[in-house]
Amino acid sequence: MTDKSEQQAKKVVERCQKLASFSEEPGCTTRTFLSPPMRDCHREIAGWLAFLGTQVRIDAAGNLRALYPAATSGAKRLLIGSHLDTVPNAGAYDGILGVVLAVSLLEALSGRKLPFEIEIIGFSEEEGVRFGTPYIGSRALIGRLDEELLEHKDANGICVRRAIEEFGLKPSEISDAQVSDNALAYLEFHIEQGPVLDQLGRPLGVVEGIAGQSRLEITYIGRANHAGTTPMNLRHDAIAAAAEWITTVEQEANGTSGLVATVGRIQARPGATNVIAGEARLSLDVRHRSDDVRTRAVETLLRKAEQIAERRGMIVRCSMQLDQKAVAMNPFLVRQAGEAIQRAGCEPHTIVSGAGHDAMILAEKVPAAMIFLRTPGGISHSPAESVEIGDVAKAIESGLYLLDLLASSPMPQRGT
Ligand SMILES: [Zn+2]
């Protein structure tokens, strides 16, 4: 790490911490879609960009957009961004770091212009906290912030449309937020939010794809009865059936390479100490890089759920709530990002992201790639989230090499 990149990295970390102070709740960082502190966040970032010859605007979906011109007119446009919203009681780096790093790359160019424009995007919404629907910001860029989504309501009964109006923006102008026809590619720096790079001792990773995801609700229906008078062999205990199935889910994921499966929520009815549960409702979350493997795993788990129910004389119901396909990053950009990381003196680790990101949405319209930064301890979505200064410096160096590689290479094509 050079002295210069270390200084830049320290500045990046200070800026992330400054943005973390813009919060809806005192003493912690919570910043949801178009909340008042988002305005402070925009003002702060616009202040940094003011000296870089960029045009800054907030589009109608509340995304911060800053355009840095190319060396020549009529050039293509490289998009670099991440999200500015947070989960409740968040850390300072998830999403934010990607936007702050993009600003730092522009600063490091010191006025040098490239053969493409650079547009920095700070997405307004990725976490899905306020409206229960994620990616509102990036959906606007690919033309999928539609009428239905505009009617989604938050906990106070305010719909997305009204939230946009109350922030001083015009829902009628949402179509103007779409990516321009000259978009070349989308790059996103993001913390890994997992333990893989940390365990390998590698500062940076290249994301080759984002795992597909299935979300289901499983309900075991047994028979509620007296916990004292019903002999064990005459019970139809919904919680016991659910427990048996939960361990099956764990075994299935343990036995399938790359598969992660989670039962994160269980609700029992009637939910009393002295009553055998008549109903147990569970969530299931299954993810894998291969849609085939994921789909087969879900089928197996549902079949086993039925076998357990049958043996115990119960009914099990399943409803699919999300079936999101895996998204590949652009192979050309993945190779270029790997080479840039190597030039910065790091061995890139190729990784599949288990978490969804804005890049997954953008990839529908634009060749996309992501670079992950090691997350110390794998801790994220927590105030304890952190980054290493040296890793941030390597990310800046890699980013600059990547800009140079893209400047001197043919344009990426979708799927090549
Ligand atoms: Zn994030």
Image (tube, rainbow, N blue to C red):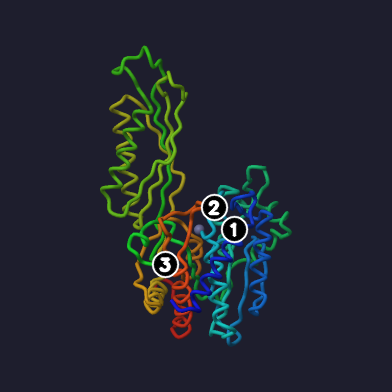
Amino acid found under the numbered disc labelled 2: Ala
Task: Look at the numbered discs 2 and 1 and tell me whether their residues touch, using CB distance below 8 Å.
Answer: yes
Residue 124 visible from this viewpoint: yes
According to the image, label 2 marks what residue?
Answer: 90
Amino acid found under the numbered disc labelled 1: Ala
Local secondary structure at mark 3: loop
- Ligand 1 has an atom within 8 Å of the beta carbon of the residue at disc 3: no
Gap in angstroms between the C-alphas marked 2 and 3? 27 Å
Measured along the vertical axis of the image, is residue 316 above or below residue 284? above
Residue 329: which disc? 3
Of marks 2 and 3, the one in the foreground: 2
Is 241 left, or right, of 186 in this rendering? Answer: left
Dividing the picture into quadrants, the one containing residue 137 is bottom right
Q: On the rendered image, what quadrant is the N terminus found in?
A: bottom left
Task: Look at the numbered discs 3 and 1 and tell me whether their residues touch, using CB distance below 8 Å.
Answer: no
Q: On the rendered image, what quadrant is the C terminus found in?
A: bottom left
Q: Residues within 10 Å of mark 1 (few under 14, many from 20)?
A: many
Residue drawn at x 32%, y 41% is 249
Local secondary structure at mark 1: helix
Residue 325 visible from this viewpoint: no
Gap in angstroms between the C-alphas marked 2 and 1? 8 Å
Residue drawn at x 53%, y 55% is 91
According to the image, label 1 marks what residue?
Answer: 20
Residue drawn at x 61%, y 78% is 68
Of marks 3 and 1, the one in the foreground: 1
